[in-house]
Image: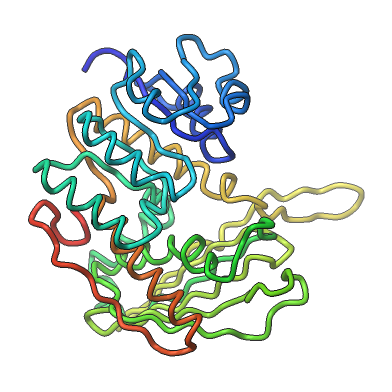
Amino acid sequence: MGELLGVAVLGAGHMGADHIRRLDRVVSGARVAAVADPDTARAEAAVGGIEGASVHGEAVAALDAPGVDAVLIASPGPAHEEALLAAFARGLPVLCEKPMVPDPAGALRVVEAEARLGRRLAQIGFMRRYDTGYLRLKALLDGGEFGRPLMLHCTHRNVSSPPHFTSAMLINSSVSHEIDAARWLLGQELTAVTVLRPASSARSPEGLADPQFVLFETERGALVDVEVFVNCGFGYQVRCEAVGETGSARIGDDHGMLVTARGRAREEVPQDYLVRFADAYDREVQSWVDATRGGRVTGPGAWDGYAASVVAEAGVRSLESGGRVPVTLAPRPGLYGPNGR
């Protein structure tokens, strides 16, 4: 494909607007062909005069707009299933932000629809697979330098949670990234979840169980623990330590900018995921554009999105019951190899 890839972006909120900027100013080989958002004024503002980009109030209208070759879905999770199935019906390659579909039944319908096509069209936006630190950790684990992996220790902290955030969303929104990262890093499915609730922080809104401690078991006996704390107040922090039989490695301790002024030095802590993972998002979208222009689909797929939804649902059930909840996945269609590939 010699021409620029025309992309329809669905959703012009915080994430969608950032992807519109990225496609227009950062990524090569693509252009914003159409944008859809129920709030058309917000869509117009996100487009910001990008030449040739049409604005629509409905997703389907954007998919059918002239010059659309592919779709980037950045709308709220409940709208993803309909958008994915509409893209599949038109044979359009898709990059879909996580969660692919929030509920496992809907996620499985997407997997089955793609399997019926006999070819992959969807890449799911688990951008940590494109972060430099995570890529280095994955290479170390795959190379066997530490022997058999035994544990992953993970930290996921946010400055504050938005007003609509619920206790369940700490699992199915925040920890969904750790779910995919653990499956990918270890090359194993997660088989059970236990969620523990320490005393809630005084900074957390009333009724929000924050922080939480999540423990995952894997099919080959490794353990993964996650501290998720979405109202820590001081910064956005994501860390992961892999412990093997003969060694360990930790990522996420990178130092931010060091500012010296008025006789003092201070180190800046990222306040937002779009700052911490800016390079990963750029690399993810560029990789998707390059693959799509070459007629390929790479990266995390629909099976990965489905598996994350199933594990997250089990985590929410554990949060509610206080007990260990097994994870049961549907049979994997032949279209998807190990871990969705």
* Front one among 64 and 32: 64
Task: Please tell me whether residue 67 is drawn above or below residue 253 in the rendered image.
Answer: above
Q: Is residue 278 left or right of residue 248?
A: right
Colour scheme: rainbow
The extreme bottom residue here reads: 323
Q: What percent of the width, then of the height, locates residue 276? A: 56, 50
Q: Quadrant of the N terminus?
A: top left
* Quarter location, residue 235: bottom right
Q: Position of residue 185 (x, y in %)?
A: 31, 65
Residue at figure coordinates x 23%, y 65% from the top left = 143
Where residue 23 sits, quadrant-wise, is top left
Q: Quadrant of residue 87?
A: top left
| Residue located at (42% from left, 70% from top) | 249
User: Which of 158/247 is in front?
Assistant: 158
Question: x, y (%) of residue 40?
Answer: 57, 25
At horizontal 16% and vertical 61% (from top left) the residue drawn is 338
Instruction: Please state the horizontal and vertical placement of residue 85, each as a whole percent of the image.
Output: 27, 40
**For residue 326, above or below residue 86:** below
